[in-house]
Amino acid sequence: MNVESIREFLGWCTVINFGIMLVTTIMIIGCQGFVGKLHGKLFGIGEADLRTAYFQYLANYKIAIIVFNMVPYLALCIME
């Protein structure tokens, strides 16, 4: 593997992960009633706590994408 293929790989990983995050966000917002009731029953969590858990999930996922995909991609772009 060369630096170019690793850079391309990380770029596509970033795009795919942000796409997954976007779909997840749309599903949480769009189906909030149904998904909230389902997750509330499954995990025994109140609606207010569930909203906090959703926010924490999205925030942690975004941070992981930035740290593990975007930053290495940008570093390889700068190196080139």
Image (cartoon, rainbow, N blue to C red):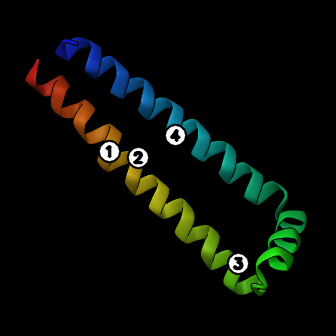
Label 4: state its secondary structure. helix
Drawn side of residue 33 relative to residue 51, left or right: right
Q: What residue type is labelled 4?
A: Phe
Q: In this view, does 3 lie above or below 59?
A: above
Q: Dot 4: few (<14), some (14–19), or many (≥20) neighbours within 10 Å? A: some
Where is mark 2, residue-wise?
A: 65
How far is mark 4 from mark 1, CA to CA? Answer: 12 Å
Which of disc 4 and disc 2 is earlier in sequence?
Answer: 4
Q: Name the residue under label 3.
A: 50
Asked if disc 3 and disc 2 are in contact, CB closer than 8 Å, the reply is no
In the rendered structure, which disc, 3 or 4, sits on the residue that comes first in sequence?
A: 4
How far apart are labels 3 and 2 at the CA level? 22 Å
Mark 4–mark 1 CB contact (< 8 Å): no
Q: Residue at x 81, y 55 (%)?
A: 30
Q: How far apart are marks 2 and 1 (CA)?
A: 5 Å
Q: Do the residues labelled 2 and 4 touch (CB within 8 Å)?
A: yes
Q: Which of marks 4 and 1 is in front?
A: 1
Position of residue 16 in the picture relative to residue 2 (left or right) = right
Residue type marked 1: Phe
Is the residue marked by circle 1 packed among few (<14), some (14-19), or many (20+) residues within 10 Å? few
Position of residue 50 measured from the top left corner of the image (x, y, whole percent)? 70, 78
Mark earlier in primary sequence (4, 1): 4
Q: Name the residue under label 4.
A: 18
Cβ atoms under marks 2 and 1 closer than 8 Å: yes
Q: Name the residue under label 1.
A: 68
Q: Which amino acid does label 2 sit on?
A: Ile
Residue 1 drawn at (x, y percent) = 22, 12
Residue type at the position of mark 3: Leu
For the point 28% across and 13% down, the residue is 5
Image side of residue 52 versus residue 26, left or right: left
Point out the residue furthest to the left here: 79
